[in-house]
Image (tube, grey):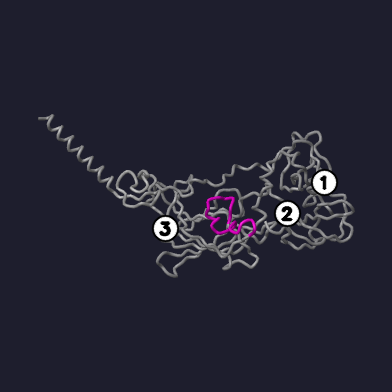
């Protein structure tokens, strides 16, 4: 009796499983290869392609407007369906190179870039359409242009960066309803996200960001760059969502070298500017270069080699801010900012020329004979670094700013 019971049980169970499988097979599906609809078998009735496997539970997007943030467990990204901007720069290297979509492509080495020559405020804006009306708690930024050119020159400091911005938040289904928040972005590069908690805002329709002021670029003062912006919601990331950018993790920046303690690779031969045409302040640390460190401040390419701007004290006698060849210092060249002119004008006749921005720097044995047309490369501590030619020699020296007349902020470079 017991055996008959179990036999009947297994027969019924088998029939149940067969019916379930038949039902599953009977469920219509669309062929991903040819688009044939109403397939019910395991193979497409048109092209013979195999029925696609059902997505794993972890891949089902239960919240289509939210996405995982790589490495973050208590925040999710609010998806942006459309992005628009007041304008963007177009050039011969690619008309869409600086389009607004570059600010949400999860690649720090690209950016939205626009010209501020015609002003800011209501004329310079970036609009993010969230589509699904999700809540937004935070806005994250990567300010400026996080990239290097083909010669290793960093693009951050030479281009302008947003400083003060206004964030206007509009709500889904509430025409004319919005809030405005003022934020100040920090002037920093190759760091983590700048995260701003703006408080919970429910059912956000779109967010408009208008640029009110900028940090000027040293070479392109009016070309304003923003690498990344992200709308963020405080929530558990355990949604079983597959980020749409999973195939590209973006640029990863390692911890940067301490540029205040650069070791020497040989004795330190120097020039006042980045090239052999400039005068020679001297050669330093002939016997103790192995135990000496200097501070690295910048770099310049002369067409054949890199020169490095270094600052150091000469055994307590006087300080120097001068140039040396890359081969003489142990520095990662891609971590140094490139030095560009920041102004031009004139300097009066003076004997007060220095090897750095202050009286604690060595006096240069060079007097300026009469008024000189100069290009300015630095401005610090009441002194200006000027470049000029006198006789057959080039010089970059520091003079009191009171003895100069400089037009600041000129763009000497052309297109970047």
Residue 129 in percent (x, y) is at 47, 61
Query: Is residue 60 or residue 350 the one in the foreground?
Result: 60
The Cα atoms of the two marked residues, 1 and 3, are separated by 61 Å
Report the side of 58 relative to 115 (left or right). left
Between the residue at mark 1 and the residue at mark 2, the CA separation in whole angstroms equals: 18 Å
> How would you classify the magenta stretch by its main secondary structure?
loop
Q: Which residue is mark 1?
A: 276
| Residue behind mark 2 | 340
Task: Name the residue carrying label 3.
Answer: 134
Query: How far apart are the two marked residues, 2 and 3, measured between alpha carbons?
Result: 45 Å
Name the residue nearer the viewer: 73 or 33: 33
Q: Which residues are magenta?
A: 91-111
> Is residue 103 rendered magenta in the image?
yes
Against 118, residue 250 (above or below) is above
Secondary structure beneath disc 3? loop
Query: Is 224 contained in the magenta span?
Result: no
- Residue 250: percent from left, percent from top: 54, 47
The numbered mark, 1 or 2, whose residue comes first in the sequence reads 1
Count neighbours of disc 1 (C-alpha within 10 A) and say few if under 14, some if 14 to 19, many if 20 or more: some
Q: Are marks 2 and 3 in contact (CB under 8 Å)?
A: no
| Picture residue at 29% right of the left edge, 47% below the top | 40
CB under 8 Å between discs 1 and 2? no
Label annotation for residue 348: none
Characterize the local packing of mark 2: few (<14), some (14-19) or many (20 or more) Cα atoms within 10 angstroms: many
């Amino acid at each position: 009796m017991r055996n008959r019971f179990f036999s009947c049980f297994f027969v019924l169970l088998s029939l149940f499983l067969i019916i379930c499988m038949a039902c599953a097979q009977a469920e219509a599906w669309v062929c991903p290869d040819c688009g044939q609809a109403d397939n019910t078998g395991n193979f497409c009735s048109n092209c013979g392609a195999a029925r696609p496997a059902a997505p794993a539970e972890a891949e089902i997007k239960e919240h289509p407007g939210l996405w995982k943030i790589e490495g973050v467990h208590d925040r999710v990204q609010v998806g942006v369906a459309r992005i628009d901007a007041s304008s963007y720069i177009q050039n011969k290297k690619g008309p869409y190179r600086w389009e607004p979509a570059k600010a949400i492509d999860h690649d720090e080495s690209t950016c939205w870039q626009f010209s501020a020559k015609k002003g800011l405020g209501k004329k310079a804006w970036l609009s993010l359409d969230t589509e699904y009306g999700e809540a937004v708690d935070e806005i994250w930024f990567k300010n400026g242009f996080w990239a290097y050119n083909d010669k290793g020159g960093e693009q951050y400091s030479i281009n302008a960066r947003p400083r003060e911005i206004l964030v206007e938040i509009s709500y889904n289904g509430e025409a004319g309803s919005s809030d405005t928040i003022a934020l100040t972005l920090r002037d920093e590069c190759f760091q983590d996200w700048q995260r701003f908690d703006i408080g919970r805002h429910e059912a956000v329709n779109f967010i408009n960001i208008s640029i009110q002021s900028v940090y000027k670029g040293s070479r392109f003062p009016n070309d304003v760059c923003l690498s990344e912006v992200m709308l963020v919601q405080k929530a558990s990331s355990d949604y079983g969502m597959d980020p749409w950018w999973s195939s590209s993790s973006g640029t990863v920046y390692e911890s940067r070298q301490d540029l205040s303690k650069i070791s020497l690779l040989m004795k330190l031969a120097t020039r006042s500017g980045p090239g052999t045409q400039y005068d020679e302040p001297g050669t330093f640390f002939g016997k103790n270069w192995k135990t000496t460190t200097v501070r690295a401040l910048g770099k310049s390419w002369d067409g054949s080699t890199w020169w490095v701007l270094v600052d150091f004290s000469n055994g307590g006698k006087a300080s120097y801010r001068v140039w040396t060849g890359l081969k003489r210092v142990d520095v990662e060249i891609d971590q140094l900012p490139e030095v560009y002119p920041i102004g031009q004008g004139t300097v009066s006749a003076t004997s007060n020329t220095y090897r750095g921005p202050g009286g604690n720097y060595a006096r240069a044995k060079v007097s300026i004979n009469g008024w000189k047309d100069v290009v300015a490369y630095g401005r610090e501590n009441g002194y200006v670094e000027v470049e000029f030619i006198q006789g057959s020699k080039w010089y970059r020296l520091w003079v009191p700013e009171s003895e100069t007349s400089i037009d600041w902020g000129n763009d000497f470079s052309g297109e970047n």
